[in-house]
Every structure is written in structure tokens, then in C-alpha cells.
Image (spheres, rainbow, N blue to C red):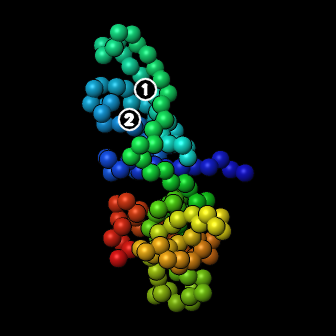
Amino acid sequence: MSIPEFRAYDKREKNLIYNQDLWLPRSLLNIGHTVYPVHITEDGIHYRLNCLSNHYEHDWEEDVVTCYGIEIMAFTGFWDHEEPRKKIYCNDIISFISKENSDLPSSSQTGRIIFCQGSKEWIVVDKKEHYLEKLCQVVSPRVIGNWFDHAELLE
């Protein structure tokens, strides 16, 4: 079994954060804290807070986890079919061809990836979260954006 992989979306700063990215909440950056690579889990973004004595009485260091203003998204285990190939994460927007319409390349659809708790599967849904297809059954998926930055792609 593989180790789950996650990315995060910082809703305040409006950017995607991946494991090992250099990241720190803006409020801490503004007062001069050191930036270290992060680790992302389903619990949130794990980062190291290193506080030097020029701001405090003594130097200290702490590992912190934040989930406030953060959306955590899991890697689905699927990749798109465009070069260079991209990992498909929860809340990605993809264009795809339904398996039943694979003979008709002009029948491309667009949808968002979510995890269905009921069936325990990754599925593709439309803007109103109506089911379109199981992710494992789509043909030629291509990541074209993510829900946070490009929701209009589902119009």
C-alpha cells in the first residue's frame, strides 16, 4: 500500500502548496520568521516555526500544523494523459471522454474530481455535483485547472 499524498490550497493567499514547498503563513513571514519546507497530511500543513531571539527573549523552535483557511486535497492515484503528465488530485478540473463514448473524440466533457464516501471511489461531477463518471473509467483525462482558481471552467 502506498503512502497517501496530499496538496493544500491556501484560501487567503489563493495558491496551491505541495509537499516540500517553502511556505509559512503570511503573518509570520511579515515579522521575519524563517521559511522551511512543509509536509502536508490529511490533518493540515505541517511546518517548522523557528523564532530567533531578535523577536523573543530566547530562541525557540516548534513544529506546527495548520488547517485554518486551508483546503487539503488527496492525490487520486491517477495521472492525466497530456505530456508532461500531471497527477490528478481531488478538486482538479479535468476534460475527459466517457468510456462509453470513447469512439467519439468530439464528445469531451469537463468535470471536477471528488471522493464519493458512499462508494469509496473517485468520481467526476459537474458544477452542481451531479455524477458524470467514475474516474477509473474515463478515457484520456487531462487536468485543465483546479476548483479554486478555475471554477468557471465548469460553466
Q: Is residue 103 left or right of residue 29?
A: right
Which residue is labeled 1 in the image? 49
Q: Quadrant of residue 126?
A: bottom left
Q: Name the residue at the left extreme.
A: 30
Q: Residue at x 47, y 82 (%)?
A: 108
Three-letter code, disc 2: Leu
Q: Residues within 10 Å of mark 1 (few under 14, many from 20)?
A: some
Give how far across and how far down residue 66 sits, in percent.
45, 38
- Residue 1 at x, y = what percent? 72, 51
Please provide percent x and percent y for residue 86.
Answer: 50, 60
Residue type (three-letter) at the residue carrying disc 1 = Leu
Residue pushed farthest top? 57
Q: Residue at x 53, y 77 (%)?
A: 131
Where is residue 136 shown, x and y percent of the image?
Answer: 63, 71
Q: Are marks 1 and 2 in contact (CB under 8 Å)?
A: yes
Q: Earlier in the sequence, mark 1 or mark 2?
A: 2
**Inter-mark Cα distance, 1 to 2:** 8 Å
13 up-or-down from 90: above or below: above
Q: Secondary structure at mark 1?
A: strand
User: Which of 126 and 153 lies nearest the eye of the viewer?
Assistant: 126
> Residue at the location (34% across, 60% down)?
149
